[in-house]
């Protein structure tokens, strides 16, 4: 199963949690690598990339509907969620800047 599997993409666009779970599983390493790069050295000493991945996954599950992510590519949508989680973690550990 590839990350651009048409059945997975169709399922996600229809709000199917099982399709999202499979997509997350297939793209886990790539999303973790993205999170690692975005954490930075200081924040990486406070937060594990795996924790951000888990928070990102949970948020994706909470917000998945047939209307969302809409036409957005699922990996891009997950990266956007991860970025928000990283910003939140930065604010929590280093104060709002």
Image (tube, rainbow, N blue to C red):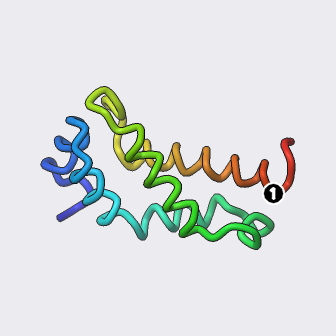
Residue 61 relative to residue 43: left or right:
left
In this rendered view, identify the residue nearer to me: 70 or 95. Answer: 95
> Where residue 75 sits in the image (x, y, percent)?
39, 49
Q: Quadrant of the N terminus?
A: bottom left
13 relative to 27, above or below? above
Residue at far top of view: 67
> Where residue 42 sits in the image (x, y, percent)?
80, 67
Residue at x-position 45% and y-position 52%: 58
Residue 82 relative to residue 29: left or right:
right
Q: Say which quarter of the image contains residue 67.
A: top left
> Where residue 40 sits in the image (x, y, percent)?
72, 64
Residue 81 relative to residue 42: left or right:
left
Q: Say which quarter of the image contains residue 3.
A: bottom left
30 relative to 60, above or below? below
Task: Report the label total.
Answer: 1
Disc 1 packing (10 Å; few <14; some 14–19; many ≥20): few
Residue at x-position 57% and y-position 65%: 51
> Where residue 4 sits in the image (x, y, percent)?
23, 53
Residue at x-position 52% and y-position 67%: 33
In this rendered view, identify the residue nearer to me: 87 or 54. Answer: 54
Q: Helix or strand or loop: what does disc 1 sit on? A: helix
Residue marked by disc 1: 93
Q: Quadrant of the C terminus?
A: top right
């Amino acid at each position: 199963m590839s990350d651009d599997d048409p059945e997975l993409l169709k399922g996600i666009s229809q709000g199917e949690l099982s399709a999202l779970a499979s997509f997350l599983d297939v793209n886990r390493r790539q999303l973790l690598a993205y999170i690692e790069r975005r954490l930075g050295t200081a924040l990486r000493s406070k937060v594990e990339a795996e924790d951000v991945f888990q928070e990102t996954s949970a948020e994706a599950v909470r917000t998945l509907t047939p209307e969302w992510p809409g036409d957005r590519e699922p990996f891009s949508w997950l990266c956007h969620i991860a970025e928000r989680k990283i910003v939140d973690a930065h604010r929590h550990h280093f104060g709002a800047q």
